[in-house]
Amino acid sequence: MIDRIPESQYNYLFFCGMYSKNKMKHTIREIPTMNIPNNHTYKVALPHLCKAELVTALSMFQPDVIHIATPSSLGFFALNYAKKHGIPVLSIYHTHFISYIKYYLKNLPFLINFTKAIIARTYRNFYNKCDVTYVPTLQIAEELKEHGVSPRNFKLWQRGINTSLFSPDKRDRSFIKRLTNNDYPSILFVSRLVWEKNLETLFAVYDRVQELGLKVNFLVAGDGIAGNEARTRMKNAFFFGFLEHETLVKVYASSDIFLFTSISESYGNVVIEAMASGCVPVIARGGGSQALVDDGVTGFLCRPDEPDDYIEKIKKLLDDNSLRKKMQSEGLQFTSTLNWENLAEEYFNDIENLAHYSESLKKRECI
């Protein structure tokens, strides 16, 4: 979306704790950060350490609209500033925080419901004060409503896919063969290797594949704090680690089945990337990802914590080549409709409308 900003029409100022210094060409204010205690790969921005500088920067910039990425400390700082100065707010629901709790507090189960209640209250305090909240799927919208978030300002806004990048044309079976020394079908898992991706079910599916002696390759792209555990638990799997896009698209297109056990996604970009590459998804019926698969048409949905259900669907695809090809075709047709240009046009129209709304309120106050 940043790459699609019409610079002749909009002037953006970014506040963030971490960013890609190679890509960003817009004005950026970097916020001090700290690692969160139980996961060093996550950082949280601390705006109150530079509050005066942030307020000065915002006052000088005089924004017409504030776009807030997430209800973090920085997000609430921006929300409070916006409400104090009568500036409309747009937010996009990115991260399904509440679904992480059962994984991070699995050793402290008595705290799970208490912590979920705190997060639900945070959702209400944040999203109920936004003027527009983009939700990625209808399932996520329903979940937010269950947590007490008003749907009054919800707007369904999905994600796009670059179908020239993620494409069956990138298929290269010789690439996989050089790695595995065989021509077996490949089952692919792509994700950060963190516990909230329901890795225990992934391990259980892998174990059943080994027990049944299925002649397949188990491929894993991604890494994270559970990476060492995953390598120990899946000794015969092939681990790529984090991949650059050029290699990742080749791995997607050269694999046959995309296995995804996570139920903590707000959307699930990897599911769309797999489908656009001709890799048929077999995924958990949970979280936002389930909305992306038409069960039995573009892939299969499975009971999230039942490895035998995944195995049944995997075997069905391995045994029926015509079914797999039909699902590939249906998946490609679906992903062809997910266009970033259309999403960008919708986003900037909403920014424009919010800016006009802000201007009309200011005029009314003057009168």
Image: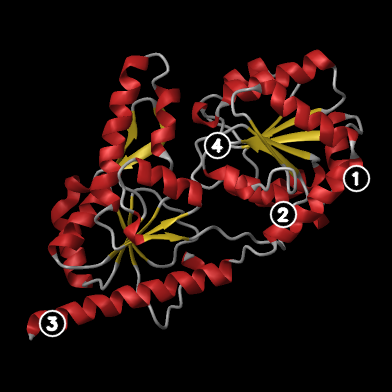
Q: CA distance from mark 4 to mark 2?
A: 21 Å
Q: What is the x, y in percent for residue 203? A: 65, 20
Q: Nearer the viewer, mark 2 or mark 3?
A: 3
Residue 32 in view, yes or no: no
Which class describes the residues within 10 Å of circle 1: few (<14), some (14-19), or many (20+)? few
Q: Which mark is residue 322?
A: 1
User: Which residue is denoted by mark 2 in the rendering?
Assistant: 276
Q: Quadrant of residue 211?
A: top right
Which class describes the residues within 10 Å of circle 3: few (<14), some (14-19), or many (20+)? few
Query: Is 125 placed above or below 21 here?
Result: above
Q: Nearer the viewer, mark 2 or mark 1?
A: 1
Q: What is the x, y in percent for residue 230? A: 62, 21
Label located before the other in sequence (2 or 3): 2
Give the structural element (helix, strand or loop) at label 3.
helix
Q: What is the x, y in percent for residue 258? A: 72, 39
Label located before the other in sequence (3 or 4): 4
Contact flag, marks 2 and 3 (Cβ < 8 Å):
no
Q: Which mark is residue 364?
A: 3
Tell me the kind of residue under disc 1.
Ser
In the rendered image, the quadrant that contains the C terminus is: bottom left
Tell me the kind of residue under disc 2.
Ala
Which class describes the residues within 10 Å of circle 2: few (<14), some (14-19), or many (20+)? many
Residue 117 in view, yes or no: yes
Label located before the other in sequence (4 or 1): 4
Q: As drawn, is 359 to the left or to the right of 340?
A: left
Q: Which mark is residue 286?
A: 4
